[in-house]
Image (spheres, rainbow, N blue to C red):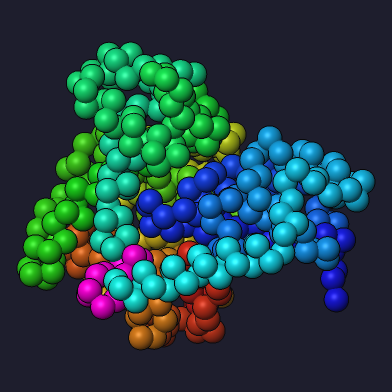
Amino acid sequence: MEPFRYHVFICDQKKPEGIPCCAARGSAMTIDALRKEVAARGLMDEVQITLCGSLGACERGPNLVVYPEGVWYSGVRPEDVREIVESHFVQGRVVERLVTRDAAALRAEIQSNRAKMLAAQRAKDAAGILPDDLNQTLRGYQESRVLLTALELDAFTAVGGGATAAEVAQKISTGARATEMLLNALAAMGLLAREGGVFRNTPTTARYFTEGSKDNARPGLIHIANIWHRWATLTDCVRAGTAVSRQESVERGEAWTRAFIAAMHRIAAERAPLVVEAVGVERVERLLDVGGGSAAYSIAFARASEKLHATVLDLPNVLPIAQDHINEAGLAARVETRAGDLRHDRLGVGFNLVLVSAICHMLSPEENQDLLRRCWEGLAPEGRLVIQDFILESDKTAPKHAALFALNMLVGTEAGSTYSGEEYAAWMHEAGFQEVRQIRLPGLSSLMVGVRG
């Protein structure tokens, strides 16, 4: 059975540096060009594109195979894609100049490459060499740190439409030699392109990392750079059992707060429609957004119902940022801000919905139990509590992002962590909530919902 007219398998195998593979020969750009051309020609319902592991003809890459004919194309560059789509997919004529026709020679080449690969693996294993994937994990911090440094220095904006290392260094006040080393590394990672002595942004870095782009994510990503410094203390934190370098948010200064809220706002703006859809706004007239940050969730709920009024509770240094977003959304009449500390302040009364999003992981179990009791007190009868967070399975080893985020709380808070659905349910029942249930959302976070009887 073949549900599509053509099914394209294209290799995107990444092998250790120095070993021939399609990824090293630019398969990512070929894949991107193929997807765009197929979409542009209106062929997405006729041509299925599937990424696959090594096809075996590694020195010839990028390689792709088109079924049902089983045509092997090799050395396919982005500039070849339009011809393949027009000739093969539209007109049904194979592009002969890119086809490997000698099946016996191709089979022998694939078998030879496979034998070499297996022999190399056996030799590495006999010598006790670390597996490639484990070695990559150990060294993964290097590329992360290169990108974070470039973001901290705003190097992508300095590169702009094209600049030499010396020009970039002058713009961002860095050493010319060191700046060229940094830009070369970014080019090696595929984040910049170098033509002679001139560096240029890729479409992706121009879109997400440069000042003036509507999708510039740099302000929020600076928060990740701030986190990186705390993660460097992880060994000491494990020994001590808690964070060894910790400041409360009010002590970290305006720059830290704005980077943190910007990061949270980008996440919340993406997640908010999913939360609103899952929770609903029927019979919700008063919403309390505990630790509401940028007010992204309150804004989303208010947009979903003209009858809904929301209160964003957060620290005084956060509220001006929230108010800017509220004003920009034109919702100042229905979304208000209130200064308060969610760790101990009373939350108010008579709310139909209390939202606690990305808060519980900052708190200890005891603090969460206390917060949920105050949430129960703040709700009207039949009102609902909605917790959004990274929720672990019962053995706390999955999902991986939630297990790793527990360590993020270890290095950054006194007693925060990530918690399991069973733990949340127990705390909610203890606080008096009924009909407690977990709602799994697409993406990294889930909801815990309970009703005040």
Question: Does residue 84 lie above or below 111 as drawn?
Answer: above
Q: Is residue 164 left or right of residue 254?
A: right
Span colored in magenta = 125-134
Q: Point out residue 403 in the picture as x, y percentages from the top left corner.
A: 34, 71
Question: Does residue 262 lie above or below 16 as drawn?
Answer: above
Q: Is residue 193 left or right of residue 226?
A: right
Please state which of residues 348 and 428 is positioned toward the viewer in this rendering.
428
Q: Inspect this view and state whether residue 376 appears.
A: no
Question: Does residue 399 lie above or below 113 as drawn?
Answer: below
Q: Is residue 143 left or right of residue 178?
A: right
For the point 86% across and 43% down, the residue is 87
Q: Point out residue 33 in the picture as x, y percentages from the top left corner.
A: 67, 41
For the image, the number of numbered tags is 0
Question: Is-magenta flag for residue 133?
Answer: yes
Q: Point out residue 394 in the picture as x, y percentages from the top left corner.
A: 39, 85
For the point 31% across and 51% down, the residue is 340
For the point 41% across and 48% down, the residue is 264
Q: Which quadrant of the figure contains the N terminus? A: bottom right
Q: Inspect this view and state whether residue 112 appears.
A: yes
Please identify the quarter of the rendering in which residue 341 is found: bottom left
For the point 13% across and 69% down, the residue is 238
Q: Point out residue 255 in the picture as x, y percentages from the top left corner.
A: 27, 34
Please state which of residues 75 and 286 is positioned toward the viewer in this rendering.
75
Question: Does residue 288 lie above or below 76 as drawn?
Answer: below
Question: Is-magenta flag for residue 111?
Answer: no
Please state which of residues 193 and 39 is positioned toward the viewer in this rendering.
193
